[in-house]
Each structure stands twice: as structure tokens, then as C-alpha cells.
Image (cartoon, rainbow, N blue to C red):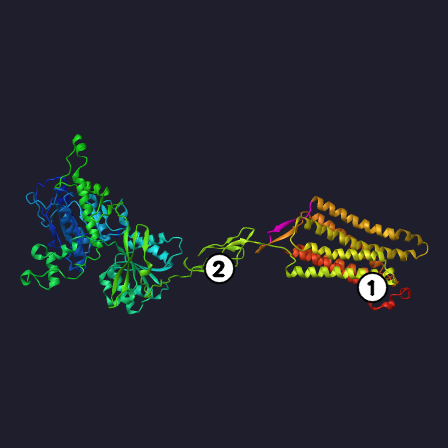
Amino acid sequence: MSWFPWLFTPWSPSALSLLLLSVMERHTGLEVVQAIVCSRWGAPINKSLSQDGDVIIGGLFNLYYKSSAVEHGFTMLPHYEPCTGLDLESLKNAYTMTFAVEEINRNSTLLPGVKLGYRILDSCASSYWAQQVALSLVGGDARSCNLTPSTPPGQPVPLLIGTASSTSTIVLSRVLGPLSVPLISYMASCPCLSDRLNFPNVFRTIPSDIYQARAMARMAIRFRWTWIGAVIENKDYGRLAIEAFQEETRGKGLCFEFIETVLKETIVSDASRVALTIQASTARVILVFCWYTEIKKVFLELAKINVTDRQFLASEAWSTSDDLLQDLDISKVASGVVGVAIRSSTIPGFENYLRSLHPMRRPDDKFLWEFWEMEFGCSSLPLCSGTESLEGVKNPFTDVSQLRVAYNVYLAVYAAAHALHSLLSCPDRESSSRNNSSTCSSPKHIKPKELLQHLNKLNFTTPQGDMFYFQGADIPAKYDLVNWQETPEGSLKLVLIGRVDGFDLHLNESTIQWSTGSNQVPVSVCSESCPPGTRKANRKGEPLCCFDCIQCAEGEISNQTDSLHCERCPSEFWSNAKQTACIPRQLDFLSFNETLGITLTTAAVSGAVVTTAVFVMFLCYRQTPVVRANNSELSFLLLLSLTLCFLCSLVFIGRPSVWSCRFQQAAFGISFVLCVSCLLVKTVVVLAVFRSARPGAGALMKWFGPGQQRGSVCLFTSIQIIICVTWLSLSPPVPQRDLGFQGSTVTLECAMASVVGFSLVLGYIGLLACTCLLLAFLARKLPDKFNEAKLITFSMLIFCAVWVAFVPAYISSPGKYVVVVEIFAILASSYGLLLCIFAPKCFIILLRPEKNTKKHLMAR
């Protein structure tokens, strides 16, 4: 990983060798028999905060934040000047360490008989300075470069607390790793430091950024933000946080419109670029993982171009920054920020400790001297009255209302103390004696490697009553959720709105003030959620969270928001009107209550009534020439069969049952055969009459007398009865639900179990009809007025045309319309026969009685 700054250490090989040799001398007892003379570069470390003790622990804090800008030309040894600009928050963190050490020293149960000391140095927010001060701590006092056996270095520290950045912690871990010196960081949150293989000596009292990224992801899911922008500070650390965010939201339809990177070295140009990107974006929620100094530059650029309608999600690196909260220039841009913050806690007695600090009681404390000069405007104590006090002073140093980083430092000191307590308690003293091994560790001979082992097994209760332990390098994730809300003065204030415990998110939504200035949650989506009844269809060439909502097809449903697919309903179910649920398909059949059923019933009953009326009229006029001349017996039988034809159509209407399915086809087949048989016999009789009129054919009529006519009709009808009985006995039609037609209804119909039987019934009717048509056609030009051949011919043409058209219509009709087609064919053919054969006779009987005479009929 070539980007690690530790590979570009400012130490010269000779200086680094000296320090490592010094370390080896302190930890292995190696004696130096010859003076070592070396030269070193860089300014000496002349400021420290220290207290002697039996065991000394080191502390690294970014007490100064303004580093000197030095260009390295690679023509001479690099030169680094100390930083300037005392940081009050970091100074408070450093005094948190001194307070914790003094509190532990007063504790009679923790490290009894052992005085804990400290040595705190400034790491100058620089990896280079962090290396220098860390090596000076673990190797003793390296101020003197001329080391001889008579001038031993100072007491080395077996453990370091620091630093405040992930980069410096990575560098120190690489440098101190071979020495197994434990490093407890209170601010290094890079997820990479959880890797115990690469960083076995690193511990931290701040959760990994993985957890805050997941907390932000759960907030995005909770508020249904699917279209998000991101600003990250470091392409490596920020990338890991973004990956954790994406992992948590996988499958939730969330994606990034942009991910912009800002660097400390190029922040001016980066801030302008990022501001323009945010202005041009359609995302209304921006996730920010960077240091507060970088996001401040971005906010100022956004204020210049008046972008005030974005909702920012803040990482813990800037979510509690007073520098941002008090800046009126960015209050409109940053209003409504929702952020993850380090869990705040209280440290009893710490505020009194801070306010009791005074340079006169700590004359060697150069940091306190400098702070005193800054706060009270006096350059040194002779020029100060000596009565100055921090009582009543309000600044970041004395503010203990929300101890976040300071509490992490406090926990780190206690973790170090409990590990030392465990090591110095020597629970295996007896086994060590039996094995003739070395005696247990003493405060003056602590081996960092042993201390590292005890840190890995650490488990204790803090003074606040919380359980503390390390999970590898990490502690269980605990965060506060904060919100930036406007004050009447125009600045922003920090409001606690919830907390994070591990993977549990506890949020009080009613207390949040969003960037809109109200409690209305901002909307940030590329596409609105697809409601139930629709499915998502991704737009070609666009991110997954940009999509269209397509309505589910009929028979398909989606019962969840943002469904990717529509599911087809089971065969006996159908989708409701909104395509959100499958409901049972309604049974559909031709009923007497619907319009079509009423119409067909009316037509059938009307036909039967008219036919009956004709029958009655013929019965009344049975002695008239028109009735007698047209074979009155067959005419009455024909009218009866037509009545049956009309009435049999009613059997097809209504809910199909086992008996109705059987009876309807039998009634249809037999009644029509009876009807056509009568016409066929009538036609044959006409032909026989005219044939008998020829010389030598007089005996022909004895074969076509009334008895023979009735017998012929019975014979033809009996054949159809035999066909129907055989069909209905072997494979009759049965009621069945037709699921083939996809719709909201299921057709209940009489299914033809045997197509052959139905075909024989129709075929036999067709055979008789065609025979009748052919014979009637041959007899159509016979001269007598009582000749019915013309009427039968025309009626048979209509009959055959109807039933020829019936076959394809019957096969292609869906659902209940199969029944409608058959009823229509029955009624059409019945009306055709009735009108064609009996209408002319009724016309003569009722309207032209003068023609109903024997003279008129015998005119030809």
C-alpha cells in the first residue's frame, strides 16, 4: 500500500537506527560499550505535559493544528518546524488524560501500590511529527544524540494513547508493530484498522466508520431516500464507508447520483467543483464523510451560489463542530443537518478539574501557559495579576456539556490501566515459579508484548457503570444522532434526536428540523416508488433507482411497493381492478337474468307462442282446402316439432347441471330430426302424388298412405333417439369450468366429453336436411297450387345455411357465447321453417279467405 505516509518517514537512517537501538537497549538489556555519536535534523520536542510514575503511558494529541508549509526540493535534508495555533478541544482532550490518570492514582483497587504517570506530546496533526514523538516516547528521552552508558535515556513508555487521525495511526502501527507497542486511538475510525493481521497492535475507543455508515444507510432506508449524492475526504477511507453504506442498502433500490472526493491539499479547487456538482444534481440528500475544515469550504462555496435546499447527512468528523455551528455565513446552507456523533457522556469532577487549572500550580506546563496568555491576554505570569481564574469562562476548553472525544480519551486511559492491572496482578505466578521461568512483570520492567496480550482479553466496568471490552481492535458501536437547528440569533444549535446501539437505530422523528425548515421529511428519489399493482421497469442506461412504473397485466398482481415482477394468479383466481390481489374468478354462464339471456328467452317463447297460435288456427281451419291440401296431419306434427324446437332452446339457458347438459342436446337433436323428418316425408309425398298421376304408376300411392307417412317419421326420429341414447350412455356432456379463457370469470359450461357423439347428432340432422333440400328442389316446379316444394326448398336453404355457419361460429366462440351461438342457430332455423312454410298459408287463411277454396286450388 504505497500511499501510506510512513513509507516517506522524515527520519534519516542513522537517526532511526539510533532510536531503534535505544529501544532494544531498554527492552533487552543490551549494553552499549561504546559511545555512539550521531547527528539529527528537525526541531527538538521542547513542549510536553508529563508526570512521573512507576509506569509511564504516552499520549499523542494534535495540540497545534497550523503546520508550517515547507517545500522539499530533494537537494538537502528535509526540515520540519513545530506547528502553531493551539487547539482548545485537543487541549481539553489532553487534560482528560491527566485527569483520568490522577483519578486512577486515587483509586485504591485499581493498580494498588503503583503510581501511573504520563507523558503527553504534540503530534501536530502530522504523520511525520507523530513518528518522531512516538519513537521518542517508546525509546526514552531522545533529546540528546550523544548517548553513552553513563547517560541513560529516560524511561520508555510501554503503551501509547493516540492519535487523532487514521493516517497517523496507520503510520505508527507500521513503525511500532515490530516492537509490539500497543496503540489505543481515540479518534482513528478508518475501517481498515479493524484488520488484526495488518494492525495487531492497534486498539481504539471509537467505533469503526463502518457502523456510522450503516447507521446513515438505515436512516436513508427509513426516510425512503433512494437518490443520494456523496462527498468523501479520502478516496481510501471514504471508499470503505461508502461500500459499507451500499452493503447495508443492497436490494433497497438506493444509488448514488455522484461521489465527489475532496483533498486537504487541493481543497480550494475541490470545494468549488463539489459545490457546482451539488447545485446541478437532482439528489436532495447529500452524504458527507470528511473533516470539518473541508466541508466548511464546500459550505461557503454553496452559500456563494445560494444552494440552500439540500439535506446533508454528517459523519462524526464534523457533525458536532462548533466552528461550523457558529458560522453565520453557512447557517442557511447547513440548517437541518442530520448527523452521527460520537456518543456523549459525563465525567464526574472533570469540569471542576478544568476550572481549577492555573499556571502558578503547574509552572512546567507550557501548554497551560500558552492557553492562559491566549485567554487573558497576558504574555507571562509577571505581567499577569495571578488572580485570573477559569471560573465563569465559557469557551471550548471549559465546555463539558457534551464530552465526546474527551470521553474516548478517558476510556482509553482506563483501558490501559486495567490492562496494566491485569498484567501486574500476575495470576499465573505459581506456574511461573514451578517452571523456573522469569518472575512476574514489575512496573519498571513491563514488556509491551505482554501488555498487548492483556489488552486483547480486556473486560471491565467503567466508572459510569458501562461494560467495556474490545472486539478485536474495536469497541461496540454507540453513537448519538444529532440535528442542526436554527436559533433566533441566526446561528445553529446541536439537538440530540436519537442514538445508535450496535445495529439498532432509535430516532425521535418529531424533534427533527429538516433543511426545509419544517418537520416535513425531504424527498430525494430519482423515481417515485411504484405502488402495489405495478412493477419497476429500469430505464436503459440509467442507475437502478431510476425506473418507470408499469401496470401489471390482467391476471397478474403485485402486492408490495417497488415490486420487480408481477405474479400471475392461480388458474381459478383473477386479479382485482387494481392488480393488487388475486380474487376467486366468478362463475359465468348464460343466465335468465342477464340481457342476452332475457332476449333469447323472449325470442324462444315468442316462437313457441306463434307456433302454437298457428297450430290452433290450423286446427280451427282444418276443413279448409289450404289446410287439407297440404297434408294436415304432417302439418300438425310439424308445428308440434317446431314448438319443441323453440322450447328446447330454453334448456340451454341457466346454470348447467348434469341433467340439463344431457337433456339439452337430446331435446335439440330429437326435436329437429322430428321437424326435418316431417318436411322430408311431406316432400316425398308430393313427389309420389305427381308420380302416381302418370300412366301405370297408380300403385305407387299405396306406399305413401297416412300410415306409411307416420311410420316414416317415427323411423327417422327413432334413429336419432338411438344415437342420442348411445351417446349419453357412453360419454355424455358434463358441467365443467372452462379455465382456458383468461378473465375475471370462469365459464361454467357443458363440456362435450365425446365430440363424435355430438357430430353424429348434427350429421344425422344435416343428412336429413340435405336429402329434403334435394327432393324439394326436384319438386319445386310442379304445377299445382297446393304444392309445398318451393316453400320447403326455401326453408331448407335457410336451415342448411344457418347450421353450416353454426359450425365455425360454435368452435371459435369463447365461454358462454358457445351456448349463445347454438341457441341462435336453433331459433334462426326454427323461425325460418315456421315463416317459410306456414306464413303463406296463414296469410291466405286470415287475409285472403277467397283463395281458401277448392275451386281456386284446383284452377291448375
Badge 2 amino acid = Ile
Q: What is the x, y in percent for residue 530?
A: 45, 59
Residue 418 vs residue 743: left or right?
A: left
Disc number placed over residue 203 in the picture, else none? none
Query: Within 10 Å of the Cα at label 1, are there few (<14), some (14-19), or many (20+) other Cα atoms?
Result: some
Compared to 481, does 718 lie above or below?
above
- How many numbered dots are placed on residues in this image? 2
Q: Is residue 548 magenta?
A: no
Q: What is the x, y in percent for residue 698?
A: 93, 54
- The nearer-to-camera label among 1 and 2 is 1
Q: What residue sits 79% from the left and 58% below the top?
A: 639
Q: In the rendered structure, which segment of residues is drawn in magenta?
A: 731-741
Farthest right residue in view:
695
Query: Within 10 Å of the Cα at label 2, are there few (<14), some (14-19), or many (20+) other Cα atoms?
Result: some
Element under disc 2: strand
Q: CA distance from mark 1 to mark 2?
A: 66 Å
Badge 1 amino acid = Lys
Would you identify the image quadrant in which residue 837 lies? Answer: bottom right
Compared to 715, does 833 lie above or below?
below
Element under disc 1: helix
Contact (Cβ within 8 Å) of mark 1 with mark 2: no
Task: Decide if residue 15 is in sight here.
Answer: no
Q: What is the x, y in percent for residue 640?
A: 79, 56
Label 2: which residue? 550
Label 1: which residue? 841
Q: Which quadrant is home to the C terminus?
A: bottom right
Would you identify the image quadrant in which residue 696 lies? Answer: bottom right
